[in-house]
Amino acid sequence: MKRLAVVLLLMVIPLAAFAAYSADHPKIGLILATGGLGDKSFNDQAFKGANDACGKIAAQYDVAIEDVLDYVEPTAIAEYAGFQLQFADTGIYDLIVCIGFDQAAPLEVTAADYPDQKFALVDMVVVADNVASLVVNDWESAFLCGVVAGSLTKTGTVGFEGGKDEPLIQRFLAGYTQGAQWANPDVNVIHRFVGDWANPTLGAELAREMYNAGADHVYGAAGKSHLGVFTAAEENDAWFALGTDVDQAGTVPESADVIVASGLKRVDLEVELNILSILDDTWAAGIYSYGMVSEFGVGTGVAVGTVDINDYVTASVSTVPVPCEVVLKCVEAANGFLDGTIEVTGLVF
């Protein structure tokens, strides 16, 4: 895969040359969310899905992945529109994948301006004939993390750190709060928003505030910013953390001694499947929902404990001992979602 610099995208290259090049094999463009690679969760998962899919395409056409996948790492929301337009204007991409809910507003314009260009959008819905919207029931994974925190807390207070005070993160907070209270009706849930996806220093500062206010477990859903939660948790033997999107005890192994569990959000699966639909010519616009209660029935869960129980409660590489009864409580909660006896309420979209 090639990481494209802004100067490269602004180069003027004849479209005829692009067309000749792209006819040999499918070509994919990837616009990551602000915060970029190295967050050990959301962006890295999205990139993994794109890389895995493009690796299969490359193998089929006997070319390098670098010939199939181009990607950029925007550093500000204001850059999204420009990257979308620049990718679309080349005419070489069979699919342009846009990662993150805040790409939706510019994509509504870009998709309308380039009706023959296929787009995929992760974490938000744009209704258009050339956009596949890939969404996940984030609140399900957050609920399971809440079950873990609510069950393990010794202080009766747990914390939540979000990236921005946006509907997407509010859904994480709602799931986490209701999961903690389902497991422990007396638990107090406090929260902070970093206001940034790539500021682990501030993430650590806000996590310390919550730990010092009595929280002994803090769940992070803030991209690269909540890496700071793990840093803060290392400062006191009584402080623990929960990760998101992937088993972060594995992606941040230096903090495996404080990360008790992680919510699972299969962004990699969403992205990989949508890209591969280009390969077999089954791609279609529409809304694709992932999660326990969804058309696919997979995509959310929790990594906790040392044993894979089912598709939704899987083992973590955390070195923090978690009692079996807490893992079984997560299984009970997952079954509650599946049979309809548990539902997160008050969600804002």
Image: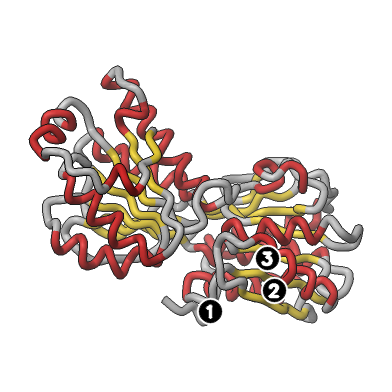
**Split into 4 quadrants, where in the image is the N terminus?**
top left
> At label 1, which amino acid type do we have?
Thr
Q: Which of 237 and 277 lies nearest the eye of the viewer?
A: 237
Could you tell me how far apart the alpha carbons at marks 2 and 1 are, in whole angstroms? 12 Å
The first of marks 2 and 1 along the sequence is 2
Residue 300 in sight here: yes
Of labels 3 and 1, the one closer to you: 3
Which is more toward the observer, 326 or 284?
Answer: 284
> Can residue 175 be seen at all in this image of the molecule?
no
**Residue 270 falls left or right of residue 142:** left
Q: Position of residue 274 (x, y in %)?
A: 32, 45
Seen at 18% across and 32% down, the residue is: 22
What's the amino acid at mark 2?
A: Trp
Please say if 340 is above or below 349. above
Q: Which residue is mark 3?
A: 203
Give the quarter of the image for residue 273.
top left
Q: Which residue bears the numbered disc 2?
A: 182
Q: Which mark is residue 92?
A: none
Q: Residue at x 85, y 62 (%)?
A: 239
Farthest residue in the right direction? 237
Residue at 30%, 60% in the rendered image: 287
Q: Nearer the viewer, mark 3 or mark 2?
A: 3
Do the residues under discs 2 and 1 have CB atoms within 8 angstroms?
no
Q: Residue 88 location in percent, x, y?
A: 20, 50
Residue that carries the numbered disc 1 in the rendered image: 345
The earlier-in-sequence mark between 3 and 1 is 3
Quick one: label 3, few (<14), some, or many (20+) residues within 10 Å?
A: many
Q: Amino acid at mark 3?
A: Gly
Secondary structure at numbered mark 1: loop
Per the image, label 3 sits on a secondary structure element best described as helix
